[in-house]
Amino acid sequence: MNRIVGGAYAAVEAARSSSRPTALDYISNVFTSFIELHGDRRGGDDPSLVGGLALLDGCPVTVLAIEKGHTARQRQARNFGSVHPEGYRKALRLMRQAQKFARPVVCLVDTAGAGCGLADEQHGIGQAIAENLTELAGLSVPVISVIIGEGGSGGALGLALADQVWILEGAYYSVISPEGCAQILWKDPAKASEAAACLHLTARDALDLGVADRIIPETDFGKKPFYDSLREALSEEIQNLRKEPGLSDKRYARFRRF
């Protein structure tokens, strides 16, 4: 297993690297027959949230993924992975569709936080995330969320209220970005490294706190054996979850305990 050295902020920097595989890389290598679906049916489509139908080892699933892009132009087009209200509402539409057709839901999370511009506030970003949390809590189908890079704040949680939350060993999961925390506590974003250490945001921290259920090793990261291993793990866990009664009650109780 690869190890992140240099402290918690080193893990944050690793998670933000433009060389890391993004959600579309996972979709093309882990799933087959992916069909992207667009629009929230309320007036917009958000390219930072990619959603659609796919096969996972022959099993139909709904995939919801936050896409950052690799290049500067791609990242700008995807709003750097900060999902707008329209993106969360698109996810909500697809969650309800998954429930109707009994499809498991797989979420790929990679965001520093939800969109925080004026238009996001005007269009109800808080309500959009809250609606997703409510819907996820009540789904009777299996839900697995994988934090593949950044797992920042409510922007991440809007796709991570799941039966199983997995995190890559080079990813992080936090209530706020280190820079945002440093600005609030010390009025100095330059203290982001100190804030990162206080936030307990590494993959190991998430596992130890019970916030995450599994750390995904980054052995052969971005190569076929890595994707094959993740596909097999997802397929196996979905089959296990299908056998469990009362998934929504267990999921709700899990997050209430937090």
Image: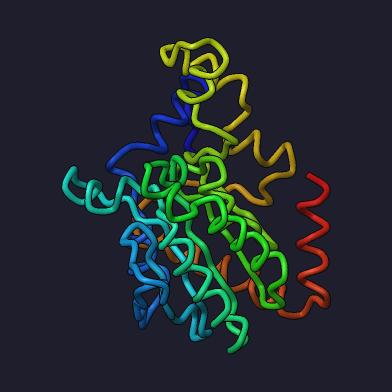
Q: Residue most toward the left?
A: 73
- Image position, residue 82 (x, y; %): 39, 47
Instruction: Judge by depth and name the residue closer to the eye, 73 or 86.
Output: 86
Number of numbered markers = 0
For the C terminus, which image quadrant?
Answer: top right
Give the quarter of the image for residue 47: bottom left
Give the quarter of the image for residue 189: top left
Q: Residue most toward the bottom?
A: 101
- Image position, residue 234 (x, y; %): 57, 68
When the figure is inspected, residue 226 is found, relative to residue 218, above or below; the finding is: below
Q: In the rendered view, does 258 fall on the left or right side of 195?
A: right
Q: Which colour scheme appears in the figure?
A: rainbow
Give the quarter of the image for residue 149: top left
Q: In the rendered view, does 36 fall on the left or right side of 229?
A: left
- Image position, residue 248 (x, y; %): 76, 70
Q: Name which residue lies at 58% across and 36% down.
A: 174
Residue 216 visible, this orientation: no
Q: In the rendered view, does 138 fall on the left or right side of 238?
A: right
Residue 141 visible, this orientation: yes
When the figure is inspected, residue 225 is found, relative to residue 186, above or below; the finding is: below
When the figure is inspected, residue 181 is found, relative to residue 62, above or below; the finding is: above
Q: Name which residue lies at 44% across and 69% down.
A: 90
- Image position, residue 38 (x, y; %): 34, 75
When the figure is inspected, residue 14 is found, relative to residue 194, above or below; the finding is: below
Q: Name which residue lies at 66% across and 47% down.
A: 212
Instruction: Judge by depth and name the residue closer to the eye, 78 or 44.
Output: 44
